[in-house]
Amino acid sequence: MASIQKRITKEGRTTYRALVRIKGSPAKSATFDKRTDARRWSQKKEEELRSTNLNCSIKNKQHTLGELVDRYVSQVMPDKNDIAIQTHQLNWWKIKLGYCRLSAVSSAMISEFRDELKKGQTHYGTLRSAATVNRYLAVLSHAFTIAWKEWDWINFNPVLNTRKLKEPRGRVRFLD
């Protein structure tokens, strides 16, 4: 949405400030001497931002969470220490949400599966601890961050808006 503000400088000169705000893009502004110049600029800039957002949304619709997990495991995981554990955690997310497009994954969806993960059982037959659930969220969050910042597949990380579970305090140990 574009808006034009009339401003008066300290010298008493009239200028016009064009401000363009489009959801998903940073706000753009410029100052002009004529209102018509400000209007033309704002219309042109608004079209540019909308076309950029359209291209981003098309780009986002192309990739699924399954593709994200596969690429993350093949490219990022070899540089990590606990490959087996984190690969297992990512495969759990892939089984549950692998069919979803990255643009469709929301914080609410992740919260729902976080609760399902909490109610699930380990291979020992006990419930998963809050710390374990948080580790599952952490590895998924890092995968989304890589897709966002390095691969430019998404515009934000939905895991960042998901509440983590409260973990108990650790043990206090004393050396003899």
Image (spheres, rainbow, N blue to C red):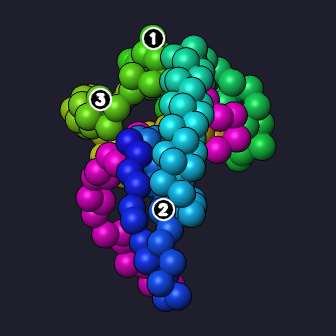
Dot 3 or dot 2, earlier in sequence = 2
Residue found at x 55% / y 18%? 58
Residue found at x 51% / y 48%? 36
Dot 2 or dot 1, earlier in sequence = 2
Which one is in front, 33 or 58? 33
- Estimate the x, y position of residue 160 in percent, counting from the top left: 41, 49
- Estimate the x, y position of residue 119 in percent, counting from the top left: 21, 32
156 falls in the magenta region: yes
Q: Horizontal placement of 146 versus 127: left or right?
A: right
Residue 109, numbered circle:
3
Residue density around tag 3, few if under 14, some if 14–19, many if 20 or more, within 10 Å: some
- Kindly indicate whether the residue at mark 2 contacts the one at mark 3 (C-beta within 8 angstroms): no
Q: Nearer the viewer, mark 3 or mark 2?
A: 2
Give above or below for 91 relative to 115.
above
Q: Which residues are magenta?
A: 149-176
Q: Amino acid at mark 3?
A: Met
Q: Horizontal placement of 92 versus 164: left or right?
A: right
Q: Amino acid at mark 1?
A: Tyr
Residue bearing the label numbered 2: 17
Residue found at x 67% / y 28%? 73
162 falls in the magenta region: yes
Give above or below for 24 relative to 103.
below
Q: Disc 1 versus disc 3: distance between alpha carbons? A: 13 Å
Quarter assignment of residue 153: top right
Dot 1 or dot 3, earlier in sequence = 1
**Element carrying mark 3:** helix
Residue bearing the label numbered 1: 99
Q: Amino acid at mark 2?
A: Arg
Q: Is residue 17 visible?
A: yes
Provide the major secondary structure of the magenta segment.
loop
